[in-house]
Image (cartoon, helix red, strand yellow):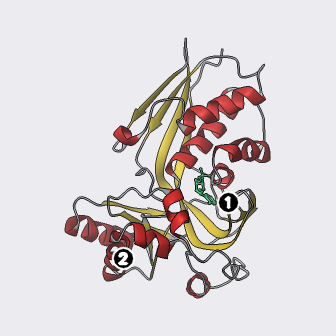
Amino acid sequence: MQRFSVAEHAPAKINLALHVVGRRDDGYHLLESLVVFTAFGDRIVVSPAEEDSFVVRGHFAAHVPLDDGNLVLRARDALRAAFPEQSAGPVAIELEKHLPAASGIGGGSSDAAATLRALDRFWNLGAGEARLQALGLPLGADLPMCVAARPLIAAGIGEHTQMLDAFPPLHIVLVNPGVAVGTPDVFRALTQRDNPPLPPFDTADALQDWLHRTRNDLEQPARSVAAEIGETLDALKDHGAGFARMSGSGATCFGLFTDAAAAEAAAAGIAEAWPYWFVAATQTLHKDRD
Ligand code: C5P
Protein backbone atom coordinates (compact mmCIF):
# COMPACT_ATOMS: atom_id res chain seq x y z
CA MET A 1 0.00 0.00 0.00
CA GLN A 2 1.14 3.55 -0.78
CA ARG A 3 2.43 5.09 2.49
CA PHE A 4 2.53 8.76 1.69
CA SER A 5 -0.03 11.48 1.10
CA VAL A 6 0.01 13.39 -2.17
CA ALA A 7 -1.24 16.99 -2.40
CA GLU A 8 -2.23 18.90 -5.53
CA HIS A 9 -3.23 22.53 -5.89
CA ALA A 10 -6.59 23.05 -7.66
CA PRO A 11 -6.24 26.58 -9.02
CA ALA A 12 -8.94 29.01 -10.05
CA LYS A 13 -9.37 28.99 -13.84
CA ILE A 14 -9.72 32.39 -15.48
CA ASN A 15 -10.98 32.88 -19.01
CA LEU A 16 -9.13 36.08 -19.97
CA ALA A 17 -11.15 36.00 -23.19
CA LEU A 18 -13.93 33.63 -24.25
CA HIS A 19 -15.47 33.67 -27.72
CA VAL A 20 -18.46 31.47 -28.57
CA VAL A 21 -17.88 30.56 -32.22
CA GLY A 22 -20.49 27.90 -32.95
CA ARG A 23 -22.57 25.05 -31.66
CA ARG A 24 -22.27 21.27 -31.99
CA ASP A 25 -25.18 19.06 -32.99
CA ASP A 26 -25.44 17.83 -29.38
CA GLY A 27 -26.04 21.40 -28.15
CA TYR A 28 -22.57 22.00 -26.68
CA HIS A 29 -21.04 25.31 -27.71
CA LEU A 30 -17.76 25.67 -29.57
CA LEU A 31 -15.47 28.07 -27.76
CA GLU A 32 -12.12 29.77 -28.20
CA SER A 33 -10.63 30.92 -24.93
CA LEU A 34 -7.37 32.22 -23.50
CA VAL A 35 -7.15 30.67 -20.06
CA VAL A 36 -4.81 31.19 -17.09
CA PHE A 37 -4.73 29.67 -13.60
CA THR A 38 -3.98 31.28 -10.25
CA ALA A 39 -2.02 30.60 -7.08
CA PHE A 40 -5.32 31.01 -5.22
CA GLY A 41 -7.46 27.89 -5.32
CA ASP A 42 -8.59 24.70 -3.64
CA ARG A 43 -6.35 21.86 -2.49
CA ILE A 44 -6.70 18.10 -2.87
CA VAL A 45 -4.84 15.70 -0.56
CA VAL A 46 -4.99 11.94 -1.14
CA SER A 47 -3.79 9.59 1.61
CA PRO A 48 -3.57 5.86 2.32
CA ALA A 49 -6.64 4.50 4.10
CA GLU A 50 -8.39 1.32 5.19
CA GLU A 51 -11.42 2.28 3.12
CA ASP A 52 -12.41 5.00 0.65
CA SER A 53 -13.45 8.32 2.17
CA PHE A 54 -14.08 11.92 1.12
CA VAL A 55 -14.08 14.95 3.41
CA VAL A 56 -14.39 18.63 2.55
CA ARG A 57 -13.01 21.50 4.67
CA GLY A 58 -12.52 25.19 4.09
CA HIS A 59 -14.57 28.35 3.69
CA PHE A 60 -16.96 27.04 1.03
CA ALA A 61 -17.15 23.41 2.26
CA ALA A 62 -20.87 23.64 2.99
CA HIS A 63 -21.56 24.23 -0.74
CA VAL A 64 -19.99 20.96 -1.87
CA PRO A 65 -22.20 17.90 -2.41
CA LEU A 66 -20.67 14.76 -0.86
CA ASP A 67 -22.58 12.19 -2.91
CA ASP A 68 -21.32 10.11 -5.84
CA GLY A 69 -22.18 12.95 -8.23
CA ASN A 70 -19.29 15.00 -6.85
CA LEU A 71 -16.72 15.55 -9.58
CA VAL A 72 -13.87 14.58 -7.23
CA LEU A 73 -15.35 11.12 -6.69
CA ARG A 74 -16.24 10.77 -10.36
CA ALA A 75 -12.61 11.59 -11.22
CA ARG A 76 -11.38 8.93 -8.76
CA ASP A 77 -13.78 6.38 -10.26
CA ALA A 78 -12.84 7.24 -13.85
CA LEU A 79 -9.16 6.69 -13.05
CA ARG A 80 -9.92 3.38 -11.31
CA ALA A 81 -11.93 2.19 -14.30
CA ALA A 82 -9.05 3.06 -16.65
CA PHE A 83 -6.34 1.46 -14.47
CA PRO A 84 -8.15 -1.35 -12.61
CA GLU A 85 -5.03 -3.21 -11.49
CA GLN A 86 -2.76 -0.39 -10.31
CA SER A 87 -5.50 1.63 -8.60
CA ALA A 88 -7.16 -1.07 -6.53
CA GLY A 89 -6.28 0.27 -3.06
CA PRO A 90 -8.62 2.42 -0.98
CA VAL A 91 -7.88 6.12 -0.68
CA ALA A 92 -8.88 8.98 1.61
CA ILE A 93 -9.50 12.21 -0.32
CA GLU A 94 -9.60 15.59 1.37
CA LEU A 95 -10.75 18.75 -0.42
CA GLU A 96 -9.97 22.19 1.00
CA LYS A 97 -12.59 24.40 -0.61
CA HIS A 98 -11.69 28.08 -1.05
CA LEU A 99 -13.28 28.72 -4.46
CA PRO A 100 -16.97 29.67 -4.59
CA ALA A 101 -19.22 27.09 -6.32
CA ALA A 102 -20.92 27.71 -9.68
CA SER A 103 -18.89 30.87 -10.22
CA GLY A 104 -17.11 30.66 -13.59
CA ILE A 105 -13.61 30.00 -12.23
CA GLY A 106 -13.58 26.26 -12.57
CA GLY A 107 -14.05 25.14 -8.95
CA GLY A 108 -15.48 21.66 -9.43
CA SER A 109 -13.55 21.02 -12.66
CA SER A 110 -10.27 22.12 -11.10
CA ASP A 111 -10.91 19.91 -8.05
CA ALA A 112 -11.57 16.93 -10.32
CA ALA A 113 -8.46 17.68 -12.41
CA ALA A 114 -6.32 17.96 -9.26
CA THR A 115 -7.77 14.63 -8.11
CA LEU A 116 -6.68 13.01 -11.40
CA ARG A 117 -3.16 14.46 -11.05
CA ALA A 118 -2.90 13.52 -7.36
CA LEU A 119 -4.14 9.93 -7.81
CA ASP A 120 -1.95 9.47 -10.88
CA ARG A 121 1.03 10.14 -8.59
CA PHE A 122 -0.42 8.31 -5.55
CA TRP A 123 -1.00 5.10 -7.49
CA ASN A 124 2.13 5.56 -9.67
CA LEU A 125 0.07 5.24 -12.83
CA GLY A 126 2.30 7.34 -15.09
CA ALA A 127 -0.78 8.13 -17.15
CA GLY A 128 0.62 11.33 -18.68
CA GLU A 129 -1.16 14.63 -19.16
CA ALA A 130 -2.93 13.78 -22.45
CA ARG A 131 -4.45 10.60 -20.99
CA LEU A 132 -5.63 12.43 -17.86
CA GLN A 133 -7.18 15.13 -20.04
CA ALA A 134 -9.05 12.52 -22.10
CA LEU A 135 -10.26 10.74 -18.96
CA GLY A 136 -11.46 14.06 -17.54
CA LEU A 137 -13.39 15.31 -20.56
CA PRO A 138 -16.55 13.21 -19.95
CA LEU A 139 -16.75 14.82 -16.50
CA GLY A 140 -16.90 18.34 -17.91
CA ALA A 141 -15.73 20.45 -20.83
CA ASP A 142 -13.33 22.43 -18.60
CA LEU A 143 -11.53 19.32 -17.29
CA PRO A 144 -8.81 19.10 -19.99
CA MET A 145 -7.69 22.69 -19.45
CA CYS A 146 -7.82 22.25 -15.65
CA VAL A 147 -5.60 19.15 -15.90
CA ALA A 148 -2.98 21.30 -17.68
CA ALA A 149 -3.43 24.24 -15.24
CA ARG A 150 -1.09 26.67 -17.00
CA PRO A 151 -1.60 29.42 -19.62
CA LEU A 152 -3.25 27.99 -22.75
CA ILE A 153 -5.66 28.53 -25.60
CA ALA A 154 -8.67 26.21 -25.43
CA ALA A 155 -10.84 25.33 -28.43
CA GLY A 156 -13.65 22.94 -29.36
CA ILE A 157 -15.81 22.59 -26.27
CA GLY A 158 -12.57 22.66 -24.27
CA GLU A 159 -10.99 19.41 -25.46
CA HIS A 160 -8.29 21.09 -27.56
CA THR A 161 -5.60 22.79 -25.49
CA GLN A 162 -2.55 24.60 -26.80
CA MET A 163 -0.04 25.61 -24.13
CA LEU A 164 1.36 29.14 -24.13
CA ASP A 165 4.98 29.21 -22.98
CA ALA A 166 6.56 32.38 -21.58
CA PHE A 167 3.21 33.97 -20.76
CA PRO A 168 3.58 37.26 -18.83
CA PRO A 169 2.87 36.98 -15.07
CA LEU A 170 -0.35 38.74 -14.07
CA HIS A 171 -1.55 40.28 -10.79
CA ILE A 172 -5.22 39.54 -10.43
CA VAL A 173 -8.14 40.31 -8.13
CA LEU A 174 -11.07 37.89 -8.23
CA VAL A 175 -14.48 39.16 -7.10
CA ASN A 176 -17.74 37.26 -6.84
CA PRO A 177 -20.87 39.13 -5.76
CA GLY A 178 -22.23 36.14 -3.85
CA VAL A 179 -24.51 34.78 -6.56
CA ALA A 180 -24.25 31.24 -7.90
CA VAL A 181 -24.86 31.15 -11.66
CA GLY A 182 -25.65 27.85 -13.40
CA THR A 183 -23.58 27.36 -16.57
CA PRO A 184 -26.51 25.75 -18.48
CA ASP A 185 -28.72 28.78 -17.61
CA VAL A 186 -26.15 31.16 -19.10
CA PHE A 187 -25.77 29.12 -22.30
CA ARG A 188 -29.57 29.02 -22.60
CA ALA A 189 -29.69 32.83 -22.36
CA LEU A 190 -27.06 33.15 -25.13
CA THR A 191 -28.57 34.34 -28.42
CA GLN A 192 -25.48 35.00 -30.61
CA ARG A 193 -23.67 31.68 -31.17
CA ASP A 194 -21.43 32.33 -34.16
CA ASN A 195 -19.19 35.19 -33.09
CA PRO A 196 -15.81 36.05 -34.67
CA PRO A 197 -12.88 33.85 -33.53
CA LEU A 198 -10.18 34.96 -31.08
CA PRO A 199 -7.57 37.13 -32.78
CA PRO A 200 -4.24 35.27 -33.08
CA PHE A 201 -2.23 35.51 -29.86
CA ASP A 202 1.51 35.47 -29.46
CA THR A 203 3.06 35.65 -25.99
CA ALA A 204 5.21 38.53 -27.29
CA ASP A 205 2.02 40.56 -27.99
CA ALA A 206 1.03 43.36 -25.65
CA LEU A 207 -1.57 41.49 -23.63
CA GLN A 208 -3.75 44.49 -22.73
CA ASP A 209 -4.00 45.58 -26.39
CA TRP A 210 -4.96 42.06 -27.36
CA LEU A 211 -7.52 41.81 -24.53
CA HIS A 212 -9.21 44.99 -25.71
CA ARG A 213 -9.76 43.30 -29.07
CA THR A 214 -11.46 40.29 -27.44
CA ARG A 215 -14.63 39.55 -25.43
CA ASN A 216 -16.34 37.20 -23.09
CA ASP A 217 -19.40 36.30 -25.16
CA LEU A 218 -21.07 34.84 -22.07
CA GLU A 219 -21.01 38.16 -20.21
CA GLN A 220 -24.25 39.57 -21.66
CA PRO A 221 -26.29 36.40 -21.09
CA ALA A 222 -24.81 36.05 -17.58
CA ARG A 223 -25.77 39.63 -16.76
CA SER A 224 -29.34 38.82 -17.75
CA VAL A 225 -29.25 36.04 -15.12
CA ALA A 226 -27.26 37.96 -12.45
CA ALA A 227 -27.44 41.77 -12.67
CA GLU A 228 -24.81 42.09 -9.88
CA ILE A 229 -22.09 41.31 -12.46
CA GLY A 230 -22.21 44.92 -13.69
CA GLU A 231 -21.66 46.23 -10.17
CA THR A 232 -18.76 43.79 -9.70
CA LEU A 233 -16.99 45.00 -12.86
CA ASP A 234 -17.51 48.64 -11.81
CA ALA A 235 -16.05 47.91 -8.36
CA LEU A 236 -12.88 46.46 -9.94
CA LYS A 237 -12.46 49.44 -12.30
CA ASP A 238 -13.17 51.96 -9.51
CA HIS A 239 -10.43 50.30 -7.46
CA GLY A 240 -7.81 50.71 -10.17
CA ALA A 241 -8.01 47.60 -12.36
CA GLY A 242 -6.30 48.27 -15.71
CA PHE A 243 -8.68 45.72 -17.23
CA ALA A 244 -11.76 43.94 -15.83
CA ARG A 245 -13.93 41.19 -17.27
CA MET A 246 -16.18 38.30 -16.20
CA SER A 247 -14.65 34.79 -16.24
CA GLY A 248 -16.35 31.76 -17.81
CA SER A 249 -20.11 31.77 -17.35
CA GLY A 250 -19.80 34.03 -14.28
CA ALA A 251 -20.52 35.52 -11.95
CA THR A 252 -16.86 35.88 -10.81
CA CYS A 253 -15.05 38.80 -12.43
CA PHE A 254 -11.32 39.45 -12.54
CA GLY A 255 -9.31 42.64 -12.60
CA LEU A 256 -5.69 43.00 -13.76
CA PHE A 257 -3.29 45.17 -11.75
CA THR A 258 0.24 46.43 -12.33
CA ASP A 259 1.75 44.73 -9.26
CA ALA A 260 0.95 42.67 -6.18
CA ALA A 261 0.67 45.73 -3.89
CA ALA A 262 -1.92 47.37 -6.16
CA ALA A 263 -3.91 44.10 -6.31
CA GLU A 264 -3.80 43.68 -2.50
CA ALA A 265 -4.92 47.28 -1.96
CA ALA A 266 -7.82 46.93 -4.40
CA ALA A 267 -8.89 43.63 -2.84
CA ALA A 268 -8.85 45.20 0.64
CA GLY A 269 -10.89 48.19 -0.57
CA ILE A 270 -13.51 46.03 -2.33
CA ALA A 271 -13.78 43.64 0.64
CA GLU A 272 -14.37 46.59 2.96
CA ALA A 273 -17.04 48.15 0.75
CA TRP A 274 -18.82 44.83 0.05
CA PRO A 275 -18.19 42.61 3.10
CA TYR A 276 -20.37 39.76 1.81
CA TRP A 277 -18.61 39.42 -1.53
CA PHE A 278 -15.85 36.90 -2.21
CA VAL A 279 -12.60 38.79 -2.93
CA ALA A 280 -9.09 37.38 -3.47
CA ALA A 281 -5.84 38.97 -4.67
CA THR A 282 -3.59 36.48 -6.43
CA GLN A 283 -1.23 35.92 -9.38
CA THR A 284 -1.02 33.58 -12.34
CA LEU A 285 0.58 30.15 -12.20
CA HIS A 286 3.06 29.15 -14.86
CA LYS A 287 4.99 25.95 -15.57
CA ASP A 288 5.52 24.94 -11.95
CA ARG A 289 2.09 24.51 -10.49
CA ASP A 290 2.60 25.07 -6.76
O1 C5P B 1 -19.33 20.33 -19.42
P1 C5P B 1 -20.01 20.98 -18.26
O2 C5P B 1 -20.68 20.01 -17.34
O3 C5P B 1 -19.16 21.97 -17.55
O4 C5P B 1 -21.18 21.87 -18.92
C1 C5P B 1 -22.34 22.25 -18.23
C2 C5P B 1 -23.40 22.66 -19.25
O5 C5P B 1 -22.98 23.90 -19.88
C3 C5P B 1 -23.62 21.70 -20.39
O6 C5P B 1 -24.58 20.74 -20.07
C4 C5P B 1 -24.08 22.61 -21.50
O7 C5P B 1 -25.46 22.93 -21.34
C5 C5P B 1 -23.31 23.88 -21.26
N1 C5P B 1 -22.08 23.96 -22.06
C6 C5P B 1 -22.15 24.27 -23.40
N2 C5P B 1 -21.00 24.35 -24.15
C7 C5P B 1 -19.80 24.17 -23.57
C8 C5P B 1 -19.69 23.87 -22.20
C9 C5P B 1 -20.86 23.78 -21.47
O8 C5P B 1 -23.24 24.47 -23.95
N3 C5P B 1 -18.68 24.27 -24.30
Query: In front here: 79 or 223?
Result: 223
Quarter assignment of residue 91: top right
Query: In front here: 160 or 254?
Result: 160
In the rendered image, residue 102, in percent from the top left (x then y), is placed at: 45, 53
Residue drawn at x 65%, y 38% is: 116
The residue under label 2 is which amino acid type? Gly
Instruction: Report the Cα–Cα distance between label 2 and label 1.
Output: 28 Å
Q: Is label 1's Cβ within 8 Å of ligand 1?
A: yes
Q: Which residue is mark 2?
A: 230
Residue 66 higher or lower than 278, as above or below: above
Residue 283 higher or lower than 108, as above or below: below
In the rendered image, residue 114, in percent from the top left (x then y), is placed at: 59, 42
Q: Is label 2's Cβ within 8 Å of ligand 1?
A: no
For label 2, the crowd category at 10 Å Cα-Cα, with few meaning under 14, some 14 to 19 and many 20 or more, is some
Residue drawn at x 47%, y 56% is: 182
The residue under label 1 is which amino acid type? Gly
In the rendered image, residue 257, in percent from the top left (x then y), is placed at: 43, 76
Asked if disc 2 and disc 1 are in contact, CB closer than 8 Å, the reply is no
In the rendered image, residue 58, in percent from the top left (x then y), is placed at: 36, 40
Q: Which residue is mark 1?
A: 27
For label 1, the crowd category at 10 Å Cα-Cα, with few meaning under 14, some 14 to 19 and many 20 or more, is few
Residue drawn at x 40%, y 52% is: 100
